[in-house]
Image (tube, rainbow, N blue to C red):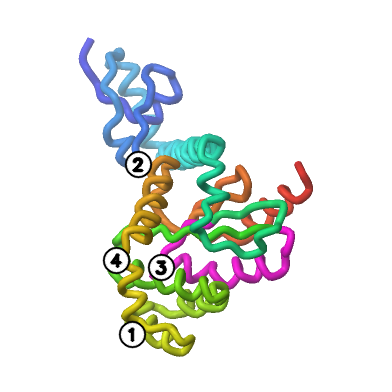
Amino acid sequence: MRRLILPLALVMATGLAACEKKDDPGAAIAQAKTVEVDAEFGEKVRAYLIQNPEVLVEVSNALQLKQMADAEKAVEDGFRRHKVELQRDRRDFVINPNGKVTVVQFYDYNCGYCKVVAPEVLEMARTNPNVRFVFKDFTLGNFGPTSEYAAAAARALGDKGLFADSHAEMMSRKPLTDEMVDDLLRRNGIDPAAVRRLEASAPQQQYLADVRTLAKDLGIDGTPAFFVEGDFISGARPEEIKAAIAKALSGK
């Protein structure tokens, strides 16, 4: 017998070895485990896969879907552990605070996909007064320093009852710059220098750090990300958000 490196498709089909979870299904195929098999059998499998390469595509797609499902389940399990921090942190911005169903969004003011979905999220909030919409500033740092300045501006504007309108305006700017934030603040009677001090303050920095920690504990590493009660939705997928809201409201 000699050692052959079998493709992941064969490993999965024959149950000869367990697959390691990879971020990239293609990498998983390239790095399949080495197993001891009869050379003649291995050559037959190789010939079959060469003649039917679509099998590898099917397996790769199936693996990717499974990984996504596993990841979403892990996040939804985290929801049960962190429900209070997710839904009832007094520092978060909330629209429809008396709603019976809660939607939580993690976002960044310079995330492109957050900007795409923002108008629909705000419209959902407007048309569903019995649904609480909770907004969490999840500033990863990869969208530039304006994100943290905008988060502080949103807090200052929110304290004046202007969160929804200012959120909509900042999300509409592609990209949002410090100068745009300054202009928004001045138009609403707020000194940008005061917001700079708020941005650097210990409470504001602690809030942003707490959101990052919560996201990490939940396995969330990007924006936008939503919880509709216990259902987790990653990305700008408004139809799925609406469906999850309808399900939550129906009590199913």
Secondary element at image label 3: helix
Q: Is residue 208 left or right of residue 129?
A: left
**Sequence order check: which comes first, mark 2 or mark 4?**
2
Image height check: is 127 above or below 134? below
Which of the two residues, 157 or 129, is positioned nearer the viewer here?
Answer: 157
The part of the chain drawn in magenta is: 105-130
Disc assigned to residue 23: 2
What separation in Å lies between label 1 and label 3 (alpha carbons)? 14 Å
Secondary element at image label 4: helix
Instruction: State which quadrant residue 33 falls in.
Output: top left
Q: Looking at numbered disc 1 in the image, what kind of residue is underneath it?
A: Glu
**Sequence order check: which comes first, mark 1 or mark 4?**
1
Instruction: From the image, tell me which residue sits under label 4.
Output: 200
Image height check: is 228 above or below 31? below
Q: Say if the magenta span includes residue 124.
A: yes
**Sequence order check: which comes first, mark 1 or mark 2?**
2
Q: Looking at numbered disc 2 in the image, what kind of residue is underneath it?
A: Asp
Which of the two residues, 190 or 132, is positioned nearer the viewer here?
Answer: 190
**Sequence order check: which comes first, mark 1 or mark 3?**
3
Instruction: From the image, tell me which residue sits under label 3.
Output: 151
Secondary element at image label 2: loop
Q: Is residue 20 left or right of residue 63?
A: left
